[in-house]
Every structure is written in structure tokens, then in C-alpha cells.
Image (spheres, rainbow, N blue to C red):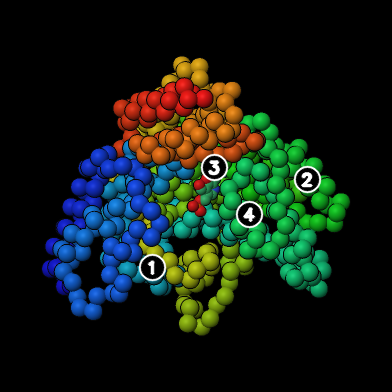
């Protein structure tokens, strides 16, 4: 393919994508395929001879698209959203087109510098503490996922506690320490904390959340004192702002004070809800974030930036550099003392030019446009709440601060009955939801996900839920 062909093929591909978005509502949100469906539709070997691009595009509909779950469909209400926008797609095309790998400043200066700039913009836009700005000791970095952000936070915390212990006793090694190190989180925290702890090789203590699915300072204090009595070493807390099952908010202000007194690293995971802090009316939820050592949220969940883009900040970047500093000669350069080398801030060496899509989105929508998007989703969730409130058969469960998630179930219904409701809804395939089990209660989660979701879609989803529930209740 030469440059002229790129223009033609690119136009074909953009048309395909634009048509996909234009007609996405007409597709069933869930595909109707079985595992292994694709194998018989494709040859068993790669083609020996080149094929026409137009032919490949022509094959898309009958092969790939048959097995797509349409995350951008306005009938998709599952998990948490994966954001997207045309501006982000364009930024990603440019990233693929430039195709540099910006692991150090010299490896591609603009790749590093744009990331520094847009991460500083976000600190200001979300009203995060100034110590996260690159102008001080802190700074921001784009990780691929929140899971990576949590992992590097725990690794940095581990490096800090090891250094502190070694200052007191130089014979201490990581090997000797690992078995005693404890990370804390809520029993509602995302499974990425479990995974990070598995990788780091230390202990995890889950604190039982209260009826609002949130954890508080006194519980953390108690857990720390129990563990210290057992000669363990508490070193890190991962607090959540907007938990995965119910979008619950931990009491970061109270927990943060305890972390400060106990010299414990506080990481705040706001993977989903963080995007809402761009709206001043939700910034009160950041109360206590000034105690945090690191913080992450996913623009790729709710801020119109497509996957992958997890924004993370650290208060003191030297902890990253200490934790991950490997410095072979071939990666050294003359400016490493004056410009950030992001290879020290992450697990892989290579990194894409992800800041481009963030930059395109921030400029195309402006902060006001992004706020409008967030507020619209929250209004749509409130609309769904109003429908539930007017139907005595349903109850809203674990009501948290309304973001785009609503948790509900059939009132007085058993877990079994609610499981049947969810199964029937997903077999029906007109809308897609996923459940959660919280405090022994099976709940249905409806999350406003798509950029395309409008009032009529929420009405439609509600009508389907009522219809399927009526059928189910008349059978039982
Ligand atoms: N943290 C929270 C609170 C989440 O809700 C999720 C995913 O939904 C994650 C972390 C993991 O996100 P990622 O897929 O970016 O690793």
C-alpha cells in the first residue's frame, strides 16, 4: 500500500466507521454467535498473496461484525462505559500514523512533553491538588489501564517503605520484608487491587464496608493496630472513589488522615467516577485527596477518550524513579536530569503517543463540552431512578451519589428471582446489563454508557425491563 492508497483505504475505513456509528442502533447490542464461530468463516492459513483492501473491508460485515458486542450502542448498559468520540479516534489515527515510541524524552520529545502538558491541564480541570503538577515534585503519566496504575502505585509504596526501613537497618532486604507488608482496601475495591498484591507478593487486608459500601477511618485504624500487634507492616491503602459494583465512595478525608499519621501510602482509584470531577458540583467528593500519594482515573471510561488512557498522578515522582530505575547504556541520554523519562513511570518500556487523543478531545470539546456530556449521563441516570421510584415492584439498592450507575432489583424478590430477571433481559438481547453481588444481594446495574444515549433510549430500556419483569412475575 502506498500513500495514495492510504488516502483511499483510509477514506473507506472512515466511511465504514461513520456508517457504523450512524446505524449502530439498528444492531442487536449483543451478538448471536457461539464460541468458535469465527474459525469456519476464515481461512485456516494467512493468504500467501496480497489481497485488495476493498475486499478485506467487504468481508468485515459477514465475519468480524457478526461477533461484536456493541459497547457504543445506546442499548449497552453493562459494566462501566468505554468512552469514545470522533475526536479521540482522529487523535488515535495520528498516534498510529506517527508511530513513535516515547519511552524517554529523547525517544520523541513531543510525545513526552504533550503528555506532561495535558496531564497538568487535567490537574487544573479536575481541581486536583497542585502537588500533582509537573512544576513541583509530582507529575502525571498516562497508563494503559487503572489496573496498571494501581500496580505501579503499590510498587512505588513498597519501594518507599523498603527505603525507610533500610535507613534504620541496612541489613533489611525486600525478601525479608515482603511477608510482613500489608496493603488495605475495601471489600468493594476493584479486583485490580487483588491482582496488584498478587504480583507484588505482599498481604492484602480487605476492610468490610458499611451499609453504604464505603470504608471509614476507624475501621482502618483498627485494622492497622491489629496488624502491627502481629508484627506486620502496613504500608499502603487503596481507597476507591466510585466503586465498581455500586459506585460507592470511601471516606478519603478520614482515611487519608490515618494514612498520614501511620506513614502509609494512600492511592486513590477513581477509575470511573473521576471524570465527573471535571464538573465543579462533584469536586466535593475529592475531599481528602490532598492526603493522597497517588491518584488515577480513566478518561477512557467516561471522558470521551477511547481505550486505552488511564490518567495517573504521583505526589513525588522520585518514588517512581526509585522503584523502576533500570538504566542500560542504550537508554541513557544527555537530558535525563532535566526532562521526564516516562519509562521510569510504568511497567513496559515502550509507550504509544496516547496524549494526542486526550489533546484532541480536550480541544475539540473544551472543558465545557465534556462537562455537558457527564451531566447529560447523570441526568439520564436520574431519569431511570424516577421510573424505578414510580413502580412498586422495584427497589433502588445501595443508592450512592448519582453518577451514571443505578443499582436496582425486584423488591422482596429473592436473589434467584433477580438472577432470572437479568438472564431473561440478556437473552432478550434488546438491552445489555451486568449484575453484581453486594452484601449477599444480587443486584442489577444499569449504567448510562454510550455517547449516543438519549431520553428515548432510557424510556425504551425501562419499558423492556418492565415487560420482562411482568412476564417473569406472572410465571412465578
Ligand atoms: N478500578 C475501578 C474502580 C474500576 O471500576 C475498574 C474497572 O471498571 C478498574 C479499576 C479497572 O479498570 P481498567 O480496565 O482500566 O484496568
The residue pinned by badge 2 equals 223
Disc marking residue 244: 3
**Horizontal side of residue 94 vs 194, given as left or right:** left
Judge whether residue 261 can be spotted in this image: yes
Judge whether residue 124 can be spotted in this image: no
Q: Position of residue 435 (x, y in %)?
A: 52, 39
Q: Which secondary structure, mark 3?
A: loop
What whole-number distance in Å separates the C-alpha atoms at marks 4 and 3? 14 Å
Which of pointers 4 and 3 lies earlier in the amino acid sequence?
A: 4
Residues at discs 1 and 2 in contact (Cβ within 8 Å) = no
Q: Nearer the viewer, residue 347 or 332?
A: 347
Residue behind label 3 places its C-beta within 8 angstroms of ligand 1: yes
Residue at the image point whose x is 27% and y is 48% from the top:
86
Residue at the image point whose x is 23% and y is 54% from the top:
61
**Horizontal side of residue 157 vs 346, given as left or right:** right
Q: Position of residue 50 (x, y in %)?
A: 19, 75
Residues at discs 1 and 3 in contact (Cβ within 8 Å) = no
The residue pinned by badge 4 equals 194
Q: Nearer the viewer, residue 91 or 441?
A: 441
In front: label 1 or label 3:
3
Count every numbered label the image shows and give the total: 4
Amino acid at each position: 500500500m502506498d500513500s495514495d492508497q492510504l488516502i483511499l483505504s483510509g477514506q473507506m475505513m472512515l466511511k465504514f466507521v461513520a456508517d457504523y456509528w450512524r446505524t449502530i442502533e439498528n444492531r442487536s447490542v449483543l451478538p448471536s454467535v457461539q464460541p468458535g464461530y469465527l474459525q469456519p468463516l476464515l481461512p485456516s492459513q494467512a493468504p500467501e498473496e496480497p489481497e485488495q483492501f476493498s475486499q478485506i473491508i467487504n468481508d468485515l460485515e459477514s465475519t468480524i461484525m457478526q461477533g461484536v458486542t456493541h459497547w457504543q450502542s445506546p442499548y449497552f448498559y453493562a459494566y462501566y462505559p468505554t468512552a469514545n468520540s470522533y475526536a479521540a479516534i482522529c487523535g488515535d489515527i495520528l498516534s498510529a500514523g506517527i508511530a513513535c515510541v516515547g519511552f524517554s524524552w529523547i525517544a520523541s520529545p513531543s510525545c513526552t512533553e504533550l503528555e506532561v502538558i495535558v496531564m497538568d491541564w487535567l490537574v487544573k480541570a479536575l481541581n486536583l491538588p497542585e502537588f500533582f503538577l509537573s512544576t513541583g515534585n509530582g507529575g502525571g503519566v498516562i497508563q494503559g489501564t487503572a489496573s496498571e496504575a494501581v500496580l505501579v502505585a503499590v510498587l512505588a509504596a513498597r519501594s518507599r517503605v523498603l527505603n525507610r526501613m533500610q535507613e534504620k537497618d541496612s541489613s533489611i532486604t525486600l525478601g525479608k520484608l515482603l511477608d510482613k507488608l500489608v496493603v488495605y482496601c475495601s471489600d468493594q475495591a476493584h479486583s485490580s487491587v487483588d491482582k496488584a498484591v498478587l504480583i507484588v507478593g505482599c498481604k492484602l487486608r480487605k476492610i468490610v464496608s458499611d451499609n453504604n459500601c464505603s470504608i471509614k477511618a476507624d475501621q482502618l485504624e483498627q485494622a492497622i493496630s491489629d496488624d502491627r500487634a502481629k508484627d506486620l507492616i502496613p504500608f499502603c491503602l487503596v481507597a476507591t472513589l466510585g466503586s465498581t459494583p455500586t459506585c460507592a465512595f470511601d471516606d478519603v478525608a478520614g482515611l487519608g488522615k490515618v494514612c498520614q499519621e501511620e506513614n502509609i501510602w494512600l492511592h486513590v482509584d477513581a477509575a470511573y467516577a473521576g471524570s465527573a470531577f471535571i464538573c465543579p458540583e462533584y469536586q466535593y467528593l475529592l475531599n481528602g485527596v490532598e492526603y493522597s500519594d497517588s491518584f488515577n482515573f480513566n478518561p477512557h471510561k467516561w471522558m470521551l477518550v477511547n481505550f486505552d488512557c488511564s490518567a495517573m498522578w504521583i505526589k513525588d515522582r522520585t518514588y517512581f524513579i526509585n522503584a523502576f530505575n533500570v538504566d542500560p547504556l542504550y537508554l541513557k541520554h544527555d537530558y535525563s536530569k532535566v526532562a521526564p523519562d516516562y519509562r521510569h513511570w510504568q511497567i513496559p518500556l515502550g509507550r504509544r503517543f496516547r496524549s494526542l487523543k486526550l489533546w484532541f478531545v480536550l480541544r475539540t470539546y473544551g472543558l465545557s463540552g465534556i462537562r455537558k456530556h457527564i451531566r447529560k449521563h447523570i441526568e439520564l441516570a436520574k431519569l431511570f431512578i424516577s421510573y424505578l421510584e414510580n413502580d412498586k415492584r422495584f427497589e433502588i439498592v445501595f443508592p450512592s451519589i448519582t453518577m451514571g450507575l443505578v443499582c436496582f432489583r425486584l423488591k422482596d424478590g429473592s436473589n434467584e428471582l433477580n438472577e432470572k430477571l437479568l438472564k431473561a433481559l440478556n437473552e432478550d438481547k434488546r438491552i445489555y446489563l451486568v449484575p453484581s453481588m453486594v452484601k449477599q444481594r444480587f443486584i442489577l446495574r444499569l449504567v448510562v454508557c454510550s455517547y449516543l444515549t438519549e431520553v428515548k433510549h432510557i424510556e425504551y430500556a425501562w419499558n423492556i425491563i418492565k415487560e420482562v419483569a411482568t412476564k417473569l412475575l406472572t410465571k412465578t
